[in-house]
Image (spheres, helix red, strand yellow):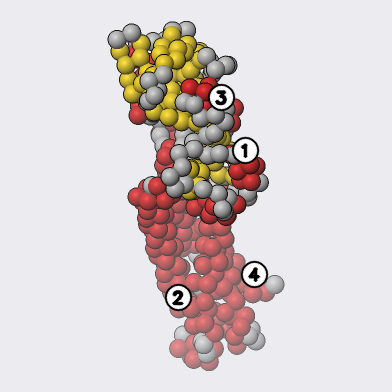
Amino acid sequence: MVVLRIAMRFLSSSKSQTALIVMGLAVGIAIQLFVGLLLQNLGAGFIGTITQNAPHVTVLPGGNATQLEQWEDMVARVEGIGGVKAVSVAADSPALVSKGAVSSSVLVRGFDIDDAARIYSIKEDIYEGAAPADGGHVLLGRELAQGLSVGVGDNLTIVTAARDTFDFRVSGLFDLGSAAVNERWVIMTLAASQTVFKMGGNATSIELKVGDVLQARSVAGKVGSALAGEPVKVENWMDLNPDVFSAVSAQRSSGLMIQSFVLLSLLIGIASLLSITVIQKSRQIGILKAMGIRDRDASLIFLFQGFFYGLLGTVVGTVIGTGLFLGFLKALEASGDSIITSALNVPFIVGSSLVVIAAATMASLLPALKSRRLSPVEVIRGG
């Protein structure tokens, strides 16, 4: 194609200028990708830290009720809802745990351990001993065990609000990463908790984990609809933590603004440089028009130039930006723990690259139109 060959000739005739434009684009794209990936992973890591050991959606007794009756039917109805990844039933109650003369106020949580492990990282966070294998054993958090001076195999006593006392043996110790949880939770089997607190076969909550934590509010609405008519209330982590969600949303908006301004600066630069190129190459364009090249083809020359600038700059910038992000993650890993996740969002990288290439091509429209209006007679006469 003649127009394509002419565009490539223009690019190759000014190698230094082409290299500068491409590197300028590459630096801008690298910054855009680095900032975008960093903010995405920072937000994801922050949300993950908040929600990793907490249910995303919770079904609780509504009205004056304190327990969930016929929870098995409710579980069956919510398990098939789109977006729900895990369901766990809990039988909770405050109590007093004591060892000798030392006692502490706690929250006893009765779980099916296997189900609960799909929501909480209970099994992974047991650093000594094992999960309760029967109703006579309990799990204690690190801080609570230290406060009571107990370890695996020791006995302790749980006193309920009704002043009933029960003896248990410590089967294991856990650390869920939260001192507040570690010093307050006592975990036992679901059946044991129901027996200790005289719940019969009832539960106190149904906890759900969703595939996308940012869809928790939507899933909670579906759960509410599925349980319509039941005396329950449905909560989700987004409504319970509005400040956290607002902060993450603000972070994403600021990141989008930064990337938009970087892209805008790139477009202005491309349009300006190509406009100068039209002036520099006006004599050649005039001669080409005098030889019979059409105005449309003259415009296409600069559209092709903009496309190739965008393509080359995007390839180089993507490599630089991705490399910077991965290097930054390596540095963080070497310095210690970080809440930033390490997900390389390929759709974001590809999408950003396509947007930049398209935008670079569009930025060449103005100089392309300018070349279209050049009169070969005036250009040659003026030259």
Q: Amino acid at mark 4?
A: Arg
Q: Which residue is mark 2?
A: 275
Q: Amino acid at mark 3?
A: Ala
x and y, in percent, of residue 276 in the image? 43, 74
* Residue 117 appears anywhere in the view: no
Quarter of the N terminus within the rendering: bottom right
Q: Nearer the viewer, mark 3 or mark 2?
A: 3
Where 110 falls versus 130 (above or below)? below
Q: CA distance from mark 4 to mark 3?
A: 79 Å
Q: CA distance from mark 4 to mark 2?
A: 20 Å
- 53 vs 354, left or right, is left
Q: Nearer the viewer, mark 1 or mark 2?
A: 1
Q: Are marks 1 and 2 in contact (CB under 8 Å)?
A: no
Q: CA distance from mark 1 to mark 3?
A: 14 Å
Where 20 falls versus 168 (above or below)? below
Q: Which residue is mark 4?
A: 5
Q: Secondary structure at mark 2?
A: helix
Q: Amino acid at mark 2?
A: Ser
Name the one closer to the observer, 1 or 125: 125
Earlier along the polypeptide chain: callout 1 or callout 3? 1
Earlier along the polypeptide chain: callout 4 or callout 3? 4
Q: CA distance from mark 1 to mark 2?
A: 71 Å
Q: Which residue is mark 3?
A: 191
Q: Which residue is mark 1?
A: 72
Q: CA distance from mark 3 to mark 2?
A: 77 Å
Q: Are marks 4 and 1 in contact (CB under 8 Å)?
A: no
Where 150 falls versus 120 (above or below)? above
Q: Nearer the viewer, mark 4 or mark 1?
A: 1
